[in-house]
Image (spheres, helix red, strand yellow):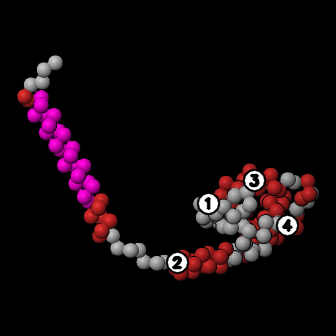
Amino acid sequence: MTLSRGMITTFLGILLIGVIIGCSGERSRADDKKKRKPRPKTEKKVEKEETNDQEEERTVPPEQLAKAKELISNAENLDDIDAKKLFKLNCSVCHGIKGNLMVNGAKDLTASKIGLEESVAQVYFGKGLMTPFKGILKDDEIVAVSKYVETMR
């Protein structure tokens, strides 16, 4: 196969354009690295936000706490419920098997200081990105899982 002058010129033109684009991309990346300013340290701010999240975690609406108290007082046969298995099936995706995975904004359950009533309310009604398990788990199962979570602390 013989190459015509036009084919060679076209090939070299495409090659040259590719080299120019490639080099300009490398230069701009190098320039970006030189121009980048160090990010300001925001660790203190994050700590404050986490502290606020923990404080917010403790504020559960009174009507939700009342429902949680009702669920706890009506709970029966909790020993017959495999709360660990329910936790693994429903909660470990975000909280992890040990309760400290913290995916999708999930709280570290090993460091949680909320009481049983608040825990039952959060599992029942959900909070933030957490799914409300009302209708997914039975009321007794919600109480059992919340009691199981207390053992992780």
| Residue farthest to the top, as pictured | 1
Q: Position of residue 36 (x, y in %)?
A: 33, 70
| Residue farthest to the front, as pictured | 2
User: How many other residues sit within 10 Å of disc 2, few (<14), some (14-19) or many (≥20)?
Assistant: few
In the picture of the structure, the residue carrying the numbered disc 3 is 88
Residue at the spot 29% in from the left edge and 70% down from the top edge: 35
Residue contact between numbered discs 1 and 2, judged by CB atoms under 8 Å: no
Q: Nearer the viewer, residue 57 or 92?
A: 92
In the picture of the structure, the residue carrying the numbered disc 2 is 43
Instruction: Tell me the distance, in whole angstroms, between the alpha carbons under discs 4 and 2.
Output: 39 Å
Give the mark, 4 or 3, whose residue is nearer the N terminus.
4
Residue at the spot 26% in from the left edge and 54% down from the top edge: 25
Is residue 6 placed above or below 55 in the rendered structure? above
Residue contact between numbered discs 3 and 1, judged by CB atoms under 8 Å: no
148 displayed left or right of 17: right
Is residue 63 placed above or below 10 in the rendered structure? below
Question: Is residue 67 something one can see in this rendering?
Answer: no
In the picture of the structure, the residue carrying the numbered disc 1 is 103
Is 125 one of the magenta-colored residues? no
| Residue farthest to the left, as pictured | 5
**Marks 3, 2: nearer the viewer:** 2
Is 27 one of the magenta-colored residues? yes
Question: Is residue 150 something one can see in this rendering?
Answer: yes
